[in-house]
Image (tube, rainbow, N blue to C red):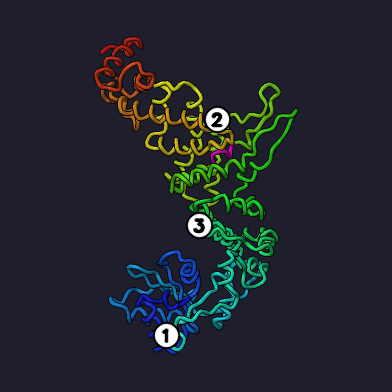
Amino acid sequence: MNYKEALQKNIFNIIANAAEDLELEAYVIGGFVRDFLLKRGNAKDIDIVAVGSGILLAKKVADLLPGKPKVQVFKNYGTAMIKTDDVEIEFVGARKESYRSDSRKPIVEDGTLQDDQKRRDFTINALALSLKKENFGDLLDPFDGVGHLERKLIKTPLDPDITYSDDPLRMMRAIRFATQLNFTIVPASLDAIKRNKERIKIISKERIVDELNKILSTPKPSIGLALMHKTQLLPYILPELSALQGIDEVEGQRHKDNFWHTLEVVDNIAENTDNLWLRWAALLHDIGKAPTKKFSKKVGWTFHGHEFVGSKMVYKLFKRLRMPLNEKMKFVQKMVLMSSRPIVLAQDIVTDSAVRRLVFDAGDHVDDLMTLCEADITTKNPKRFKKYHNNFKIVRDKIVEVEERDHVRNFQPPVSGEEIMQTFNLKPSREIGMIKDAIKEAILEGEIPNEYEAARAFMIRKAEKMGLKA
């Protein structure tokens, strides 16, 4: 292969000239090289390693670029970054690292290119292309990264126990790359993750969640989630999910394994949406089943109220992992809370009032809720699978019909509280809320259309029954 093809952009010539002027060696390293060899398209992120000062090289490159872009310097890390319209370039000086057992922050010393390649997480990320004039475009691959790319293997350059113990986030990165690229983590590396699993506790929650989000954003997230389970990392990160694993049996009655069912649901949802938060909802939709699981001689295994319990658990989980406690979390909570509603509808005769209530409660997220519930059907019985999906189509059609006619999505009452106060000469009071609720219920039950005149006439009748006069 002609590796020079990877370096056709003019930016590489500019970096090469800057390095020559400073009498430094410079190399393109890491993901850019890996993705070029995998033919994964043009990477926008470029990592440059300089044998010498990466910050000095970044400043020289910026001087040579049109418009002289700003250089962001991160002195603590000895790195610098330049952003242009089409690329983001990070510069670092070649270094060797040593670690203390209680921290993932390394003690850093200047090093050679080989030192820098050794400290990389995986052999496929230690590949480097030379930007020196005498061997421009030559590949430097001391750990057979190309061979591992060809055989689809995730392997560490050094002893995996050293690699993972030094920086435990690499355990999550190994799993993430295996999921994104559909590669296999070599057995020695997989065993090392299991041995070092407790070290994940020193990593910040934000960095762990960043890797989790990347796993959830892949076409088949179950690969990574199953690896987290296999390596025993999962209980340290998502114990609520681990708690779903296993099947209990009492008096010959068993329930399904809700952990593996959840992984199927996440894969199903990944086929239908790129919405990360809907994928989170799929991941967490059954977490309330572990704390609510009970056995009854009359009905067997039950999980009563698991949706309500699960939605409460979402807040605690998001808070613990330092995830956003904003509308994104509320969306996940709502999806978990309502996750069984369309399934119940799909089993019964679909009434207009039931659909109105579903649309009223789900609001703008009713389509997301239906997508989640369709993904939740993991039965292997083809007849039951077809029946459920046919019923869901009926529910979806009914939603469109009811919404067009009754307009209950993001419901606003046709009669305002102010009008009720003026009509019956009332001050703010419980009666106003009672009348508004009665109007809303009458509309949802189909007793009156969602129109002003009908709602006002209903308001008068209701107020009279309460002893109020206009």
Question: Magenta-highlighted stretch: main secondary structure?
Answer: loop
- Number of other residues with Cα within 10 Å of mark 1, as a class: few under 14, some 14 to 19, many 20 or more: many
Residue flagged by tag 3: what amino acid is it?
Answer: Asp
Q: Which of marks 1 and 2 is nearer the N terminus?
A: 1
Q: In this view, does 6 lie above or below 292?
A: below
Q: Are marks 1 and 2 in contact (CB under 8 Å)?
A: no
Residue indicated by mark 3: 210
Is 365 part of what is drawn in magenta?
A: no
The quarter in which the C terminus is drawn is: top left
Q: How far apart are marks 2 and 3 (CA)?
A: 38 Å
| Residue shown at 59% from the left, 66% from the top | 151
Q: What element carries label 2?
A: helix
Residue indicated by mark 1: 19
Q: How far apart are marks 3 and 1 (CA)?
A: 33 Å
Residue 293 picture quarter: top right
Magenta segment boundaries in residue numbering = 284-288
Q: Is residue 51 among what the camera can see?
A: yes
Residue indicated by mark 2: 384
| Residue shown at 60% from the left, 48% from the top | 238
Q: Is mark 3 on a helix, strand or loop?
A: helix
- Number of other residues with Cα within 10 Å of mark 3, as a class: few under 14, some 14 to 19, many 20 or more: some
| Residue shown at 62% from the left, 51% from the top | 234
Q: Distance between the residues labelled 1 and 2?
A: 66 Å
Q: Do the residues labelled 2 and 3 touch (CB within 8 Å)?
A: no
- Number of other residues with Cα within 10 Å of mark 2, as a class: few under 14, some 14 to 19, many 20 or more: few
Q: Which label lies toward us, 3 or 1?
A: 1
